[in-house]
Image (cartoon, grey):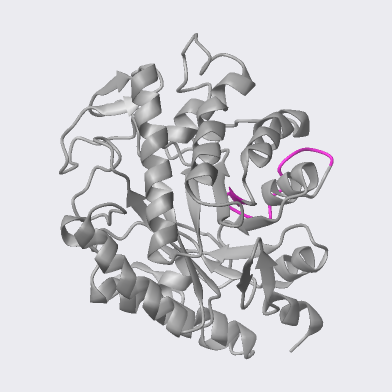
Amino acid sequence: MSASLEALFTPITLKTVTMPNRLAMAPMTRRMSPNGVPGADVAAYYRRRVEGGIGLIITEGVGLDHVSSSGHRDVPNLFGEAALAGWQGVIEGVHAAGGRIIPQLWHIGGARQPWMEIEVPGHSPSGVVLGDFGSAVAMSRDDIEAVVGAFASAAADARRSGFDGVEIHGAHGYLIDQFLWDGSNRRDDDYGGSMENRGRLAAEVVAAVRRATDPDFLIVFRFSQWKPIDYEARLATTPEELRRIVEPLAEAGVDVFHASTRRYWLPEFEGSELNLAGWTRKLTGRPTITVGSVGLDDVSREAAKPRDLSDLLERLAAEEFDMVAVGRALLADPAWANKIRDGRQDEVTGYTQKALASLT
């Protein structure tokens, strides 16, 4: 094993949690938990990825105890006795296989679709519904307080259940991101207008999660520039603007930033080769996770061939970021990590719709 590849499989300690290697499974919605309760098949699904060499599982987004948090009845929840009991089996399976696991706390906000089973008005900063589907109400101060409380309650339940931390979903056009982005936040109060105001909800959620857990509990925050309705959207157009977003979050209690990009190898700003995770690490001093078509050539969303990892390994060795999250490549091949580690790249299953037809 080369020195650069060996670095990918070197343990790392984040806060008080030691990961067996630098690889994480990126959160990807499955909708395989009837009535919000994860079962034995969910436990087997995540355990299989750990047995295949992944060190950290970041679960699919989980519903919070708030009326418009989720749009699907088969997305797993992180509240209620049945759902929490179901997660026990998932956690135990991942830990038994030697991995670590954190749930992604998710509120979809105004990102609602007319075909969603849970038909309630979305909650968004200004009543704006991304994609012009469904309906949404502009959130009042009481609504904001309720949502912050729902994130905190879920984090407390995650800690009591034995999760190794939590990830707060602040990316991809969902509720927290809707506040961050000026394309969806048109408020004129303390939660809108300036970049600092637009980031207020995110910081309040982080601070509430910290208070609801303890100082040593791992808090990861996922954010993105792009949105599903606008791949060119930007929260920050310069490093200074990015600093004004991520610095308050670090001060509020974020331990690790998960910087979501569509292609990890693209520079984030002119004049530097650093990607979004690299810039976030430089600006905050916090560890970061990079993600975005890792292991794939990204020719399309339907099919992609394996991609050489040399540049990824070089960036990791240069400490541009600290961990690497793998998405589609890991869906197609649960043993992807072990094959990469053992020099069996030619055995990696490519990402195709056919490969995913019997996804387990």
Q: Who's the residue at 31% across and 54% down the image? A: 78
Q: Who's the residue at 46% across and 75% down the image? A: 350
Q: Who's the residue at 35% across and 33% down the image? A: 109
Residue 182 percent across, percent down from the top left: 53, 21
Q: Is residue 54 left or right of residue 1?
A: left
Residue 341 percent across, percent down from the top left: 63, 85
Within the image, what quadrant is residue 302 found in?
A: bottom left
Q: Residue furthest top?
A: 188
Q: Who's the residue at 64% across and 89% down the image? A: 343
* Residue 75 visible in the displayed image: yes
Magenta stretch secondary structure, dominant: loop
Q: Nearer the viewer, residue 58 or 305?
A: 58
Residue 288 inside the magenta-drawn segment: no
Tell me if residue 335 comes above or below residue 301 in the rendering. below
Q: Is residue 181 left or right of residue 30?
A: right
* Count of marks placed on residues: 0
Q: Which span is picked out in magenta?
A: 257-271
Task: Say which quadrant the N terminus sits in.
Answer: bottom right
Tell me if residue 116 comes above or below residue 329 in the rendering. above
Q: Nearer the viewer, residue 288 or 310?
A: 288
Q: Nearer the viewer, residue 270 or 336?
A: 336
Within the image, what quadrant is residue 17 found in?
A: bottom right
Tell me if residue 193 comes above or below residue 206 in the rendering. above
* Residue 139 visible in the displayed image: no
Residue 239 percent across, percent down from the top left: 76, 34
Task: Say which quadrant the C terminus sits in.
Answer: bottom left
Residue 110 percent across, percent down from the top left: 33, 30
Within the image, what quadrant is residue 34 found in?
A: bottom left
